[in-house]
Image (tube, rainbow, N blue to C red):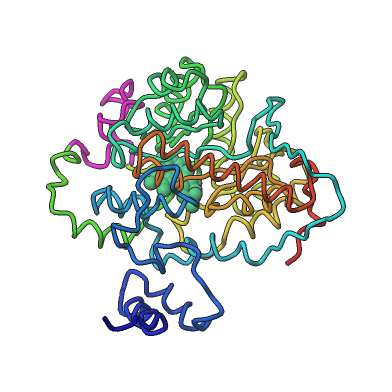
């Protein structure tokens, strides 16, 4: 048998990357940086996706990317495209990962870090971990039980969880599966009455808070999703036919109390007309609930969030799915944290894949860090145990990162440790 020259196979693989329209930007970066100086962390980029190399159990996964490739194999191409896609040229999607390299965490030594505590406090409540489950739509597309499995995992592992307006299961069902409260994420639509009714439903279900998503504005262009959809041989209309002129499907249970009359003459979309005034009106309908604004990237917007009395600001670019300006959330945090100056808690998501990413964000001033795709990889690979494994991996990595930084708790992480 001919011995395999690893350099030759790497060269071939790079040639393959350069030829692939899906990976064009990544391949370009790889070629520019030089073969030796940049090793992709994400195995989707460099490891052969040979079924024999996929992990067979959640426990076998070393990092969250090991579950990504299993989910890729399990989830049909159109749904995988929906999960994985960014917007347009995916510059924001890539920046969300790449920009963690702009911020190094300088560690302390000669401190007793035998015991490390990674709990945090949000709105006076102690959370075992700062890592939370972001709202993601249509989880039934990735695993049969969808959000029910996610809720069970989040409940068992005691992680804060936000449920999407357009989840496959309703807030009441998910809360029952979880056994404790879930936050409700609001796509306000372009109608105040619909938004108010959704908020009321969340209040009736016992949600402690509402997360108003304000960053899905124009109709987005997700090219990876469009390309992968063409590979799917199933008839999409069998499931998606209930979309009616842009009105959300009645298969999305959180809309079940919204009547056809309420949808009449409402322009399609998730809330392009959202302003501070509308958000405040909604908030004032439920004085007992907390309200967070999700999708903030500008320091002044974040300061305004505090000024208008919202309970927290959530820095997010929707995981690079909506706009492609290339502004990562970790860079946004570096400007927003000093501007907000601890007036309200800062939550952040987009691109977090490692415990060290979480530690950096906490050092820079975040109270809690959300994950989207990673737990969907866990879900798509092994269902509930896959989600649990993702949380377990990230918590373990975080504990390591905090201890390695010479800190015994998240409170010890501070902005002085961050070097650019
Ligand atoms: C498949 C998918 C569906 C999503 N659906 C929603 C949603 O319904 N509401 C929302 O506010 N954000 C949604 N998001 C964005 C997430 O809440 C979160 O901001 C993002 O996934 C974080 O980035 P990450 O995937 O890189 O971790 C979705 C993200 C994905 C990947």
Residue 20's spot in the image, x, y percent? 31, 74
In this orientation, does residue 273 appear? no
Residue 29's spot in the image, x, y percent? 48, 77
Q: Residue drawn at (64%, 53%), measured in percent from left and top?
A: 356
| Predominant secondary structure, magenta span | loop
Residue 48's spot in the image, x, y percent? 35, 66
Q: Quadrant of the N terminus?
A: bottom left
Give the camera-side residue of 9 and 125. Answer: 9
In this orientation, does residue 19 appear? yes
Give the camera-side residue of 67 and 189. Answer: 67
Q: Is residue 154 left or right of residue 108?
A: left
Give the camera-side residue of 9 and 149. Answer: 9
Residue 228's spot in the image, x, y percent? 25, 59
Q: Which residues are magenta?
A: 242-267
Q: Residue drawn at (44%, 30%), measured in percent from left and top?
A: 192
Q: In the figure, 165 relative to 393: above or below?
A: above
Residue 27 forms part of the magenta stretch: no
Q: Is residue 59 left or right of residue 355?
A: left
Q: Is residue 149 left or right of residue 126?
A: left
Q: In the figure, 382 relative to 234: above or below?
A: above
Q: Residue drawn at (27%, 48%), measured in percent from left and top?
A: 74
Count of picture labels: 0
Image quarter where ligand 1 lies: top left
Outermost residue to the front = 1
Q: Residue drawn at (64%, 60%), measured in percent from left and top?
A: 331
Q: Quadrant of the C terminus?
A: bottom right
Give the camera-side residue of 357 and 277. Answer: 357
Q: Is residue 300 left or right of residue 379?
A: right
Residue 250 forms part of the magenta stretch: yes
């Amino acid at each position: 048998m001919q011995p395999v020259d690893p350099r030759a196979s790497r060269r071939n693989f790079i040639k393959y990357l350069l030829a692939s329209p899906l990976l064009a930007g990544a391949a370009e970066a790889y070629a520019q940086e030089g073969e030796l100086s940049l090793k992709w962390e994400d195995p989707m980029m460099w490891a052969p996706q040979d079924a024999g190399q996929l992990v067979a159990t959640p426990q076998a996964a070393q990092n969250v990317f090991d579950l990504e490739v299993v989910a890729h194999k399990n989830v049909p191409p159109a749904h995988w495209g929906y999960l994985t896609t960014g917007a347009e040229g995916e510059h924001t999607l890539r920046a969300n990962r790449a920009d963690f390299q702009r911020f190094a965490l300088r560690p302390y030594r000669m401190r007793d870090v035998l015991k490390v505590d990674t709990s945090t406090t949000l709105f006076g409540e102690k959370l075992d971990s700062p890592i939370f489950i972001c709202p993601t739509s249509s989880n039934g597309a990735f695993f049969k039980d969808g959000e029910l499995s996610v809720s069970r995992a989040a409940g068992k592992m005691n992680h804060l969880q936000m449920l999407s307006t357009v989840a496959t299961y309703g807030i009441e069902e998910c809360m029952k599966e979880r056994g404790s409260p879930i936050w409700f994420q609001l796509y306000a639509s372009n109608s105040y009455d619909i938004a108010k009714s959704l908020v009321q439903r969340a209040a009736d279900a016992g949600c402690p808070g509402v997360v108003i998503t304000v960053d899905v504005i124009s109709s987005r262009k997700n090219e990876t999703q469009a390309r992968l959809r063409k590979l799917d041989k199933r008839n999409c209309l069998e499931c998606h036919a209930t979309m009616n002129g842009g009105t959300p499907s009645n298969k999305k249970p959180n809309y079940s109390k919204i009547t056809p009359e309420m949808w009449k003459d409402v322009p399609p979309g998730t809330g392009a007309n959202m302003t501070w005034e509308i958000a405040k009106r909604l908030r004032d309908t439920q004085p007992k609930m907390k309200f967070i604004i999700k999708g903030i990237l500008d320091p002044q917007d974040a300061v305004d969030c505090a000024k208008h009395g919202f309970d927290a600001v959530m820095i997010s670019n929707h995981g690079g799915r909506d706009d492609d300006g290339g502004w990562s959330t970790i860079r946004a945090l570096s400007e927003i944290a000093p501007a907000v100056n601890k007036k309200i808690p800062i939550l952040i998501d987009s691109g977090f894949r490692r415990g060290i990413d979480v530690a950096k964000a906490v050092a820079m001033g975040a109270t809690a860090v959300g994950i989207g795709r990673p737990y969907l990889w866990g879900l798509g690979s092994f269902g509930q145990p896959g989600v649990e494994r993702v949380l377990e991996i990230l918590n373990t990595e975080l504990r390591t990162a905090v201890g390695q930084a010479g800190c015994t708790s998240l409170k010890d992480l501070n902005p002085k440790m961050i070097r650019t």
